[in-house]
Amino acid sequence: MEQAAQILGLANLVGFTVLAVVALRQWRLRRDEAAAWAAASFVALGLVVLLGRLVPDRPDVLPEHAMQRATLLALLVFPYLLFRFTTAFDPATRRLARWVSLVTLALAVWTVALPRVPAEDEARPTWFIAYVVAFIAHWAALSVIAAWRLWRAGLGQPGVARRRMHMLSLAAAAITAALLMVAFGDGAGPRLSSQVLATISAAAFLLGLAPPTPVRILWRRGEQEELQRAVGSLMEMAATEEEVAERVVGPTSAIVGARGVEIRNHAGDVVGTHGEAGPGAPAEVVTTPGGSLGVWTSPYAPYFGDEELRLLHTLGGLTGLALDRARLFAQERAARTALEDADQLKSDFIALAAHELRTPVATVSGIVQTFQRVGVDDDRRAELERVLAQQVERLTLLVDQLLDLSRLDAEAVAIMPQRFCVRERVDGLVASAVGAGEGPVEVTIEPELETVADPVAFDRIVSNLVANALRHGEPPVIVTAQQSDSHLRLTVEDRGDGVPPEFVPDLFERFSRSGSARERSSGTGLGLAIARSYAQAHRGDLCYEPAEPSGSRFLLVLPIERNV
């Protein structure tokens, strides 16, 4: 039994020395607070094992006494350093931290001030027994606190981090039990048991500090399978950026134990979140041309999940590619839809032009033929001339509208701002529209109101709005205008039935007419489309909203050109 204890003692010397070397290497690579405390902890523990074999049971010379005290000091500070390692992730309360530091400092002073350390076969004075009790109580309390903090914190972590933290917790408990056996046990049995516990502790510390790759893979199996499914789903075509984000956020959160995940597209817009994204900036951000992956990790992730963070960067790169592909797919689909709409628009245009031109052309042709072939009396001639004038006017209006659309589509309409009186110009447009006696129009615009805008565009928009209100609404038609914050706002409203809600989305589309409009008039459905196009060419807009208590209300907003 004694021989087995000696063999295990040699194995523990090797194990704790390797542990110290691994901790130092991690500190050199990471250079952060947690790695520094871990390196200090395991270097102290390694010194305890190494010096314990070098110091004789009865030191005679000063160097031997110095190594004996150094061994006790290294053993004393190990649980304190392990405790500080845990506070690098989750700070302890100020009171606890102060108490731990003061007690450790007091015991360190007591250790240096000891008159001597009795050998194993010597009687132990009362003052030494008191020291040993205080030493063991301090060690056990700090080790239990550190083990509990590591175990509790590991419960919310992903597979690898959780098991690493639990291994460190078990190792701290095992080495505490080994120390208690050495302090209070006697004989070969307790010595062998303490060496076995120390061996278990060294192995558990190594697994917690730097688990081998096969062990990491085993511990990560659940998250790895979910991650592989996520990567596989990214290889499939996603219709939208939101669909890409939905496939990724869950596995991303699981692989690093994140409390929040946020995915943004190339424009910086959020397309998917998981958990509590924010507040504050994410701890890890993977940026690619296609977007970015932001992760709010726990404070334990950088130390215990270093490989997982590298996997996160790989997943972030694949997510960026998938977002880019979804964006390009959406652009291609939008372009295809636009082409289909343009083709449909062309078909509608041809059909409408053929339909709208056929009637007036046939009428004009018939009247001309009548004049040429048949003699007509004066009354009949007057009637035919009136109809001829109406159809020519209709043809002229249609051709003008088609030319307007052609110029607007080609962006060939030049906006040339000029200063003019709004009330005077609107009065002229209203007089022209009401000349046929279609209904009253109320113009409530201040006579002195002036603006700077393109008069041609202004005329085309307002005349279309007034004619539309007279044709489809009910009197009175009310025109108002006011100028503020560098914009002219002109409204035209009527008291008719208004636009049916289901037709509002198509109100400004070309060739669109509601059912009631088709029944009541022979318009082309181009007026409002032309009016809005002129407004947008002027860097303004034309909007619709229901009027109160009834009717339609159109709002024209035009920017004022100050440099004219």
Image: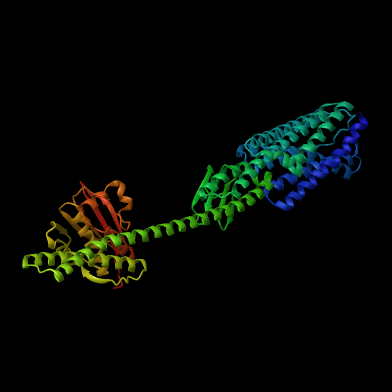
Relative side of 149 to 432, left or right: right
In percent of width and height, residue 129 lies at 80, 29
Q: In this view, does 182 lie above or below 219?
A: above
* In this view, 180 is above or below 306: above
Identify which residue, 543 or 452, lies in the foreground: 543
Res 447 → quadrant: bottom left
Q: Please indicate, yes or no, whether residue 41 appears anywhere in the rendered image.
A: no
Q: Where is residue 270 drawn, in percent x and y?
A: 50, 50
Q: Position of residue 548 (x, y in %)?
A: 21, 47
Q: Position of residue 431 (x, y in %)?
A: 14, 64
Check the picture and name the quadrant holding the N terminus: top right
Residue drawn at x 88%, y 35% as measured from the top left? 8
Q: Which residue is drawn at 64% across and 39% down?
A: 157
Task: Look at the image and name its color scheme.
Answer: rainbow
Task: Please tell me which residue lies in front, 139 or 36.
Answer: 36
Question: How many circles with numbers are drawn on the protein?
Answer: 0
Quadrant (top left, top right, bottom left, bottom right) of the C terminus: bottom left
Report the residue that reaches farthest toward the front.
Answer: 373
